[in-house]
Image (tube, rainbow, N blue to C red):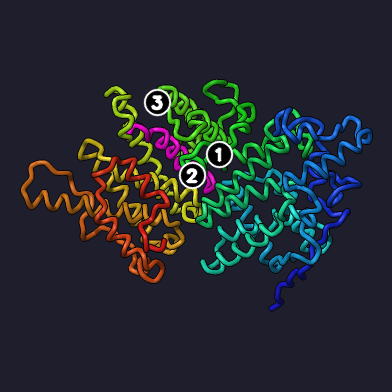
Amino acid sequence: MHQARSLRPLLLRPTSGVIKSNSATSPTRSTGYHGLEPWYQQCNTTQAPGDNSIISVARPDTTQPHANNERRTAFETGILPLLGMDGASDGGRGTPAGSSETIFAVDQDMISLFGFYRDRVHSFQFVLDDLTEIEKLICSLLSHEVQTQQIDNHSLCLLHAIMAAGAQFSDLPTAIRLSKSSQNLQSALKYLGSFDLLWNPSKRLIQALLILGHVLQNNMNPRAAWILGGTTVRVALSVGLHQPINHCALRLSPAEAQQLRLAIVWQDALLSLAFDRPPASHEMDLEPDLPALVSLDPSSQPLDYRQAMNWLCHLSFRHLPRLPQTEPVRNYSRLFHDFDFYESSLAPHLQDLQRSTSIQELQEHYSLIVHRYFLLSTLCRPVLSSQNKGKFSEEECSTILNRFQGALKQSVRAFIKLRSISNLATRSWAFVHNGLASALLLSFIRQGSDAQDQDSQEILAELVKTLTERSDDVGQFSAAHKKALRAIQALQRSSVDEIRCQSENSSQEHRPMAVSSENMPVLPEHFGNTQEQSMASLDDWLRDFDFDAFSPLESYNFIMSDQVPQDFGL
C-alpha cells in the first residue's frame, strides 16, 4: 500500500515576497513587514479611533506621504512604544526565523479534514466567502507549486484553523478526532504571533480568528471563545469594518466587508446570548447588510438559512440591552410582532418540514428552530424573575408565558431531531448549549395543566433517552452542560417521587406521572466513574438542592454558571 507522503516541516521566515492567497485583499508593498506597510500607514481616513484619539492625532498625513517624515518618525518612535506596538520591542512582528515550524498533516489528512469542513461546517458557520480560493491554496501546497515558507502567517493560521474545525466534525474515532483538532488548533495559535495581529490586520486574520472562536467553543471552552471574540471585534473595528463606505485599511470589496461583518455579528450574538452579556459588535450590526423581509417588501425573496440566521442575530441585538444589568421592561408586543414578521419571511423549507427536499434542508429546518426559539425564550425569561413581579398585567404575563413555554418545547424537540440526522447537535457547543439550556428551563416550569406538564415530561424523557444512547458525546460536554443534564434527571426523579408520595397518601390532587422510576433513562455507569469521578458527588448535591427555594430563573442561572461545588473537579 502506498503511504501518503508527508509535507516536509519547513521554517516560516519573514520575507518581502510572500504569496498572499488573495492579492486584492493584501496588496504587496515595497516596504514594511511581509512587503506590507503597517495598517496605520495604509489608512487615509479615521477608522475605529475618534478624531481626537492619540492614533488619529499622530497618524501620518497620507495625502502628502513624503512631506512629513519627522512627524512619522516621532509617531513610530514615540507613540507606538507607549501602545506596546513598536517593532524594536517585539523582535519581529511575525514568526521569527527559526522560532516556529509549520507541520501539516499528510496529504490525505489535509484533503479529508478540509472536506469535512467544507461539507459539514461551512454550511452552518458562514465565515469564508472565498472557500474556492482556500481550496486552490491547499491544492497548490499538495502539488508543491507553493511551499509553506512562501505563505503569510495569517493564511497559515487560517488553514490550520480550518483543519481543526474539520477534525471536530469528522468521522474519526473520538481520541484521534480530538488529537488532530488540538494539534491544528495549537499550530493556528502559533501563527497569530505576538503583535502581528496588531500590526497587520488582514481579511485572512479576521477569518482565522472567527473560525478559531468556533473551534474553541466546540472544544467546550466557550469562555476562551468569548474572550477571543472580543479581540476579533476590536481588530475589525481598528480597520474600519464597521464603516460600510470606506475600507481603506484592508481594501475589501463591499461584498467582502459585508460578509465579515455578518460573520462577526453571528458569532458574537450567539455567544453573548449564551453568556447573558451585551454583544460587543453593535457597530457592525448594519440593517442595510440584510435583505428585506418578504412581510415588509413583497417583491423580496424569502430568507434562506444563512440570511435567516443573520436576521435572527439582528433581532437579538435589537431587543437585548446594550449594557449589563440594565434589563428594561421589554416591549413584548413589539418583540412578538418582529418575530412573527421574521418567521413569515422564511424560505418554505424553514417554515414547513414537509417542504424540505434534501438532507441539507432538513438540517437547516431543525437548526434554525433550535436557535430562533432559544432566542425567543431567552428574551421571555425576565417574566420568571421575582424582581419583575408586578411589572406585567395578568394578561401580559399569561401571553408571555405561553410563548415562552412553547418556544422551549420547540427548541428541545428540534434539538432531539437534529441529533438523529447530524453531528451538529453533538459536536457544536452552540447547539448543545441552546438545546440543553431550553430543556433545563422547561424542567423548572410548571405549566398549569396536567396535559401540558405531561407533554413537557415526555419531551424531557425523550431527550435524556437520546443522550444516554450516545453517551460518548455526553462525555465531551462542558461542566455546565453536564450539570444541566444531571439537574434535568434530578428534577425528573423528584417529580416521580412526588407523584409516588402523593399516591401513597391518597392525595386527590396530583400531577400525572410522565415517567416511572422503572423506565426512567439513566446515564451509563461509566459516565459517572471512569470518565468523571465527580459526577456521583454532583448527584448527591443536586439531590439535596432545594429547587423550590429559588425562582426558576435563579435555579437555571446557578446550574448553568461556572459555580461548581468544591471538590467536584469539573
Amino acid, disc 1: Tyr
Are dots 3 and 1 in contact, CB under 8 Å? no
Query: Which residue: 73% across, 51% down?
Result: 195
Q: Position of residue 388 (x, y in %)?
A: 33, 29
Q: Which residue is mark 1?
A: 305
The secondary structure type at the circle numbered 1 is helix
Question: Would residue 346 be visible to someone looking at this image?
Answer: no
Distance of label 1 from label 2 (alpha carbons):
9 Å
Magenta span: predominant SS is helix
Q: Is residue 337 left or right of residue 181?
A: left
In front of the other: 308 or 353 = 308
Query: Which residue: 32% across, 32% down?
Result: 387
In front of the other: 441 or 36 = 36
Span highlighted in magenta in the image: 358-384
The secondary structure type at the circle numbered 2 is helix
Nearer the viewer's eye, disc 3 or disc 1?
3
**Residue 363: within the magenta?**
yes
- Which quarter of the image is occupied by the C terminus? bottom left
